[in-house]
Amino acid sequence: MKIRVITGLAAAVLPILALIFLQTPLLGVLIIPFSALACYEICHAAQMKNRAMIAVATIVAALVPPVLEYDLLRFVPVPWLVLVVYFFLLAILVLANFEKTRYSHVLFALLGSLGVPWAISLVVQLRDTIAANDAAYEKNLAVWLIFFAMCCAWMTDVCAYFVGSQLGKHK
């Protein structure tokens, strides 16, 4: 229990920093560790053994937030081609290590490296939406909405842990 509390407090530092730097261009950079860690955890939960695929997916997950915040795809002539190349790279990694990899791992890698970082990057989009509609919203509304979302996630995790440890089949 003590280790879980310490880990939780250490993990709370990054969201607090994100709230502090919410109104700065550094927010996309602060989201990078969240995205990379989330992708790694999804790959680990899917029991992926292909280390090359995990590494590529984690690197792509770290690249997604800055690409979305700074709109870096506008410099690519055919943006959807990047996604096709990435999918084929994952397929090649499956074929290169086929005894350890299932095709479902490609889907987990895609979800973990594209879907989750995109969802986390919605914090930046929320900030930009509120900033663009300055007359309709207060500037601090973005801070409170993001803080509320984080508190909801933290509380559900804490409650799930305590209910699961008390009522679960395996303590």
Image (tube, grey):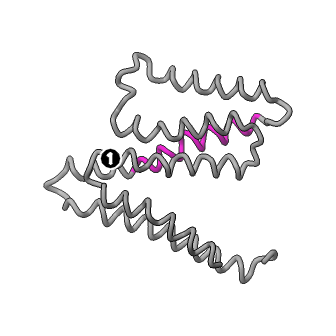
| Residue at point 37%, 66% (across, down) | 147
**Was residue 73 drawn as part of the magenta stretch in this picture?**
no
* Magenta span: 103-122
Q: Is residue 137 above or below residue 90?
A: below
> Horizontally, is 50 left or right of 148 in the view?
right
Q: Is residue 159 above or below residue 140?
A: below
Q: Is residue 91 above or below residue 22?
A: above
| The image quarter in which residue 90 lies | top right
**Residue 89 image offset from top left, x and y in percent:** 64, 24
* 162 and 130: which is toward the camera: 162
> Horizontally, is 139 left or right of 156 in the view?
left
Question: Which image quarter is the C terminus in?
Answer: bottom right
Give the SS element for disc 1: loop
Q: Is residue 101 above or below residue 147?
A: above
Give the farthest residue toward the top: 77
Give the farthest residue toward the left: 135
**Residue 26 image offset from top left, x and y in percent:** 32, 47
Residue behind mark 1: 26
| Residue at point 81%, 75% (across, down) | 170
Question: Which image quarter is the N terminus in?
Answer: bottom right
| Residue at point 54%, 35% (across, down) | 60
